[in-house]
Image (cartoon, rainbow, N blue to C red):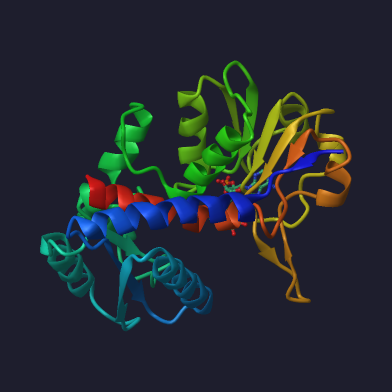
Amino acid sequence: MAVIIDGKKLAQQIREDLKIKCEELKQKGIKPRLAVIMVGDDKASQVYVRNKSKACDEIGIEFEEHLLDGDIQQKTLIELIEKLNQDDSIHGILLQSPIPRHLDINEAFRTIAPEKDVDGFNPVNVGKLSLNQDTFVSCTPYGVMKMFEAYNISLAGKNVTVIGRSNIVGKPLIQCCLNKDATVTVCHSKTKDLKQHTQNADIVIAAIGKSKFITADMIKLGAVVIDVGINRGEDGKLTGDVDFDNVYEKASYITPVPGGVGPMTIAMLMNNVIKACEN
Ligand code: NDP
């Protein structure tokens, strides 16, 4: 039976520490401030933004929300980002994705000043991560790395299999694990014989978006299993990409869904805002 990695508790500890750092900044006359841009009225995004706003409140970070209509032109979005870049009272800028398809999200990410890019999506910060330089690491991968650290799970020399290669989760995770000296295998929808790659892994990280896709037979006895997936069933219940009940019996460590990687993502966003402010 595995040790359950308690992301909720760990995230809470991180938030408590950030609260103290935030207070120290305020005593020096600096008020950490995050600007969030949302385009359109995606329901899931509204929930995410609300959660980010609550986390900011709890820590003492000022939060401002910029709601743009779904039919705006690219120019409007870019001009807003440029204005926020210039505003010295703002330390972090976040563009909530997805944004409507007619807009170019890559140009938007590129426009966010690297020093305010608390999501770590600007190519400058992505490049720095790949060069193993100090940067803003995208929040979900960063949260996963913090979990390893908190549970003393060393990555050096380990076989890590990451399933998923998205720009926001899979790819930065690959880089983070490589920077910690792991031997990294990356799998995706075109991978042949996925099971061979997961069975060989000391650490499996699933970032796929398919409920209970990783089953016990795919996992080596004693492996560490990190479940990034968040899937909402027809009954409204959240499940991960890992068949938790069965994999739990075989793994040495496992993250639950909910209460695993999810809470860590927001905690690391808050961490990046404070870091941007300290910088
Ligand atoms: P994407 O849809 O962008 O990426 C999914 C990845 O999974 C792709 O690389 C895809 O391969 C791969 N994949 C799909 N099907 C298979 C398959 N059958 N076998 C192997 N690989 C497969 O998703 P995200 O990276 O944005 O998110 C992944 C999951 O993590 C989602 O459930 C999302 O909700 C969750 N998430 C959770 C967060 C948290 O805070 N916990 C934050 C962000 C995301 P290909 O590239 O070939 O298409």
Q: Position of residue 163 (x, y in %)?
A: 63, 40
| Residue positioned 67% across, 57% down in the render | 259
Image point (64%, 31%), residue name = 161
Which residue is at the front of the view, 49 or 204?
Answer: 49
For this orientation, the residue located farthest to the front is 27
Residue drawn at x 54%, y 51% as measured from the top left: 13
Answer yes or no: is residue 76 visible.
Answer: yes
Is residue 118 visible to the viewer in this orientation of the structure? no
> Is residue 235 found left or right of 263 in the rendered image?
right
Residue nearest the observer in this picture, 58 or 196: 58
Question: Measured from the top left, where is residue 66 in percent x and y?
Answer: 29, 77
State which quarter of the image contains the C terminus. Answer: top left
State the residue at coordinates (36%, 50%): 272
Q: Residue 128: image x %, image y %? A: 30, 33
Picture quadrant where residue 96 is located: bottom left
Q: Quadrant of the N terminus?
A: top right
Q: Position of residue 225 (x, y in %)?
A: 72, 38
Q: Quadrant of residue 238?
A: bottom right
Out of 142 and 22, give the one closest to the viewer.
22
Query: Which picture quadrant has residue 69?
Result: bottom left
Q: How many marks?
A: 0
Could you say which is closer to the camera, residue 9 or residue 119? 9
